Amino acid sequence: MFERRHHDRRRRTGRREQDSLAGLGDRRRVLIVEPHDDTRFLYSVVLEEAGYAVSAVADGATAITVVQQTIPDVIVMELVVPAADGFEILQRSRDASFTADIPIIVVTASLHFDLPARARASGAVLVLAKPITVDALLCALDDVMTAVPREKLARRRLTRALLMIRTFAKQCAPDADAQLRIRSFIDRLQVAVLAIDEHGRYVAASRGATKITGYSRTQLLEMSVFDTRFGRGLPLAQPWQEAQPDRNSTADIAIQDASGKSIPVHTKFDSIFSNMHAAAIVAK
């Protein structure tokens, strides 16, 4: 019986549209914050089967760290958790600009007094009472994710891609081979990312970048941000010396793919090293 409901839900238009974001190479990500092992395990299994990429933690302090490190698309959490309660998680998530718009669903057994109203006032988009069926939880997630604008999902995943690259760069020993390892890492990514040196030349191109542009990696690595075939529209093609200090810049532009077709895209730019930068791209 559960399998039939699960199959029907996957066919809903809202979910399929969210999964079809071009060039992301990424399932929608949910963070579960739940102190009880059996409940946390049940939520994790059901949401994984429903197509989410799931992270699950048991306490508030870990949840705050995971939110900042992974930037999930939605958070499902209990209010009463050890180390830092749900209200601190709500507050810390709202305080940071790159996590402020993440929808948070509270699923709690603590419905006495004014807790539900306080949770909503603190930023929760939905407050659900325990016990809750997995079907009801999945329906709530469907409704919340369908209401999230496509543009917000795209921008969040660009931020996540650059955060992932910066995290990997920090783990690399600062030696002569560090940039080589970063370029190799980017080359394997499914999300569209281009690495650029201090002269504006592309030095790495992910699998996602070749897919969205139609150019091969070899072709992209022969280009620069100033190339008329691809890149002139990027904010990077402004005077390069002016663009370099502009960390975390974003833009909505149009690029030309290998066939000459104009593609509207979101872009996000960040510095990885002093002489290496990255641009993440996703089709609008």
Image (cartoon, rainbow, N blue to C red):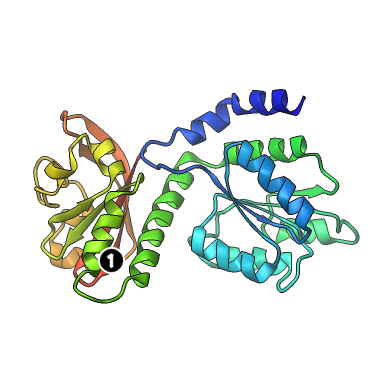
Residue extending farthest right: 112
Using the image, determine if residue 222 lies above or below residue 110: above
Q: Residue at x 73, y 56 (%)?
A: 120
Image-based side of 260 in relation to 138, left or right = left
Q: Quadrant of residue 139?
A: top right
In the image, 214 versus 129, the foreground residue is 214
Q: Quadrant of the N terminus?
A: top right
Picture coordinates of residue 124, whole percent (x, y): 69, 54
Picture coordinates of residue 123, whole percent (x, y): 67, 58
Q: Which residue is mark 1?
A: 271
**Mark 1 closeness class: few <14, some 14–19, many ≥20 residues within 10 Å:** many
Q: Residue at x 80, y 39 (%)?
A: 133
Q: Residue at x 22, y 72 (%)?
A: 274
Picture coordinates of residue 112, whole percent (x, y): 90, 59
Picture coordinates of residue 113, whole percent (x, y): 90, 61
Residue extending farthest bottom: 174
Q: Quadrant of the C terminus?
A: top left
Image-based side of 281 in relation to 276, left or right = right
In the image, 19 versus 98, the foreground residue is 19
Residue 253 visible in the shown view: no
Q: Residue at x 56, y 62 (%)?
A: 67
Amino acid type, mark 1: Ser
Q: Secondary structure at mark 1?
A: strand
Q: Quadrant of residue 55?
A: bottom right
Residue 254 visible in the shown view: yes
